[in-house]
Image (spheres, rainbow, N blue to C red):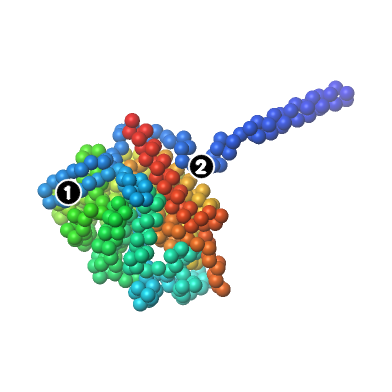
């Protein structure tokens, strides 16, 4: 018995010594020694392949016959400081209010019913009633504004410049067409281009789905956009490592059109191909499901983007899949453009979709997404979004607000500019790291 007690005392002493040593060791660790404080500069970059990525370069160039002269640069120093043309941000112009438009548009968004009538019956119906009740879980610093307000447009360009995003990706519908909750906005494009140009920003086009959209109608859309806006100083063109200088278009919900139809437009031998014509461009398709990457390749696209800011919502939006998708793109000479967002909450317009909500965690969710994007060494990173208020992905300034019926989310304890500042910090880090990737 005495021998057993002696062994027990020795074991207890050793265990106590181990716990004490562990605690002392943990006390010496800084917060940055772990992954609990992801921030720009964290060395988490895996090697993806061995080839040099294409990228935009700073140079004056003269386009081939039928194309306009353009200056394509990686970064530019303007009044707001350095901006980066490899950071693109999605931008919407569908908002309206009575002072500018005679009525509210989009701020009064309907509560979208669930497609299953049994589930839909459990949720409220109707629409929002601005200005106190808007179709968003956050409240904009500018209030429920109109996209037609010149002062709003100027503020937006200032904010985008402050975020260091050099290219705003404009949600675009053909003349006379609009989404289900808005009105046509194509007539706003000249003012947007002019405002962007004043702030040294560029504008790319995000072709939205509309009734009757097909490879033939997109052919006409591309021709219309390039003919009408292609010679504007703010019209964005992408320069690849091979020296090609072309407009770049994002095609939202591209999977709605079969790949064989896209190939008629995007393959050199297609029946109405744009390749080798004055309207040749860089076409970026949306990847939602894993199979879409093969459809995108077969359709003749030049790359793919992920758009959605809800990690895990789709195959394409899941950060864990980006390395594999980038490898697929590298192996097939395609661009992979990941989309990072600050969070996601659309329950103000889809009250039944709470399972896709992604809390911002005071910016930590955004930084995790941006780190995941940088980990795959992309040529371009997209931000979802500047002002998609319905889905709560905006980085535009938001303010605290409480009404009789609503308590809006906000960016506290941070200031309204928090997500603009985070975007700039990571844009700068992105471009610092790109210099090392190309060495």
The span from disc 1 to disc 2 (Cα, nearest Å) is 42 Å
Circle 1 — which element? Answer: loop
Rendered location of residue 79, percent (x, y): 34, 50
Most extreme residue toward the top, as rendered?
A: 3
In the shown orientation, is residue 272 left or right of residue 85? left
Rendered location of residue 131, percent (x, y): 46, 73
How many numbered discs sit on the rendered protein?
2
Question: Pointers 1 and 2 in contact (CB under 8 A)?
Answer: no
Residue at (71%, 32%) from the top-left corner? 19
Residue at (78%, 29%) from the top-left corner? 12
Can residue 18 be seen at all in this image of the molecule? yes
Q: Residues within 10 Å of mark 2 (few under 14, many from 20)?
A: some
Circle 2 — which element? Answer: loop
Work out whether residue 73 or residue 439 is closer to the camera in this orientation and state it: 73
Q: Quadrant of residue 321?
A: top left
Query: Which quadrant would the N terminus be assigned to in this image?
Result: top right
Can residue 294 be seen at all in this image of the molecule? no
Rendered location of residue 150, percent (x, y): 33, 66
Residue at (23%, 51%) from the top-left corner? 247
Most extreme residue toward the front, as rendered?
A: 79
Query: Which quadrant would the C terminus be assigned to in this image?
Result: top left
| Residue 285, above or below 119 | above
In the shown orientation, is residue 76 left or right of residue 343? left
Instruction: Pick whichever of labels 1 and 2 is earlier in the sequence.
Output: 2
Residue 69 shows which numbered tag?
1
Disc 2 target residue: 38
Most extreme residue toward the left, as rendered?
A: 65
| Residue 37, above or below 312 | above
Rendered location of residue 296, percent (x, y): 29, 49
Work out whether residue 79 or residue 142 is closer to the camera in this orientation and state it: 79
């Amino acid at each position: 018995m005495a021998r057993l007690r002696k062994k027990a005392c020795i074991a207890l002493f050793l265990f106590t010594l181990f716990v004490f040593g562990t605690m002392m060791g943990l006390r010496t660790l800084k917060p940055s020694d772990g992954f609990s404080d992801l921030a720009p500069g964290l060395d988490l970059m895996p090697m993806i392949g061995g080839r040099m990525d294409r990228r935009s370069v700073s140079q004056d160039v003269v386009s081939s016959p039928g194309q306009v002269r353009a200056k394509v640069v990686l970064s530019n120093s303007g009044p707001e400081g350095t901006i980066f043309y490899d950071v693109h941000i999605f931008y919407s112009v569908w908002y309206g209010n009575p002072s500018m438009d005679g009525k509210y548009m989009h701020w009064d968004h309907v509560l979208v019913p669930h497609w299953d009538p049994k589930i839909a019956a459990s949720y409220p119906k109707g629409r929002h009633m601005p200005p106190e009740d808007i179709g968003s879980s956050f409240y904009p610093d500018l209030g429920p504004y109109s996209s037609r307000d010149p002062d709003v447009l100027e503020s937006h360009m200032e904010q985008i410049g402050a975020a260091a995003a050099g290219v705003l990706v404009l949600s675009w519908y053909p003349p006379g067409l609009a989404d289900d909750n808005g009105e046509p906005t194509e007539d706003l494009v000249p003012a947007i281009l002019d405002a962007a140009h004043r702030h040294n920003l560029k504008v790319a086009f995000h072709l939205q789905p509309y009734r009757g959209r097909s490879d033939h109608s997109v052919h006409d859309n591309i021709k219309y956009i390039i003919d009408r806006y292609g010679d504007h100083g703010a019209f964005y063109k992408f320069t690849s490592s091979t020296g090609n200088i072309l407009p770049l278009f994002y095609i939202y919900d591209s999977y709605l059109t079969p790949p064989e139809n896209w190939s008629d437009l995007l393959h050199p031998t297609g029946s109405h191909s744009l390749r080798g014509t004055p309207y040749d461009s860089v076409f970026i398709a949306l990847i939602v499901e894993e199979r879409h990457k093969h459809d995108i390749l077969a359709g003749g696209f030049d790359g793919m983007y992920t758009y959605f800011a809800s990690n895990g919502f789709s195959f394409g939006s899941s950060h864990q899949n980006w390395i594999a998708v980038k490898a697929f793109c590298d192996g097939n000479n395609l661009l992979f453009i990941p989309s990072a967002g600050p969070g996601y909450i659309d329950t103000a317009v889809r009250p039944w979709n709470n399972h896709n909500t992604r809390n911002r965690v005071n910016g930590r969710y955004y930084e995790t997404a941006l780190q995941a994007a940088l980990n795959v060494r992309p040529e371009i990173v997209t931000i979802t979004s500047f002002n998609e208020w319905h889905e709560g992905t905006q980085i535009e300034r938001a303010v605290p607000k409480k009404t009789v019926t609503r308590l809006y989310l906000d960016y506290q304890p941070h200031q309204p500019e928090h997500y603009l500042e985070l975007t700039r910090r990571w844009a700068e880090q992105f471009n610092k790291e790109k210099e090392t990737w190309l060495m």
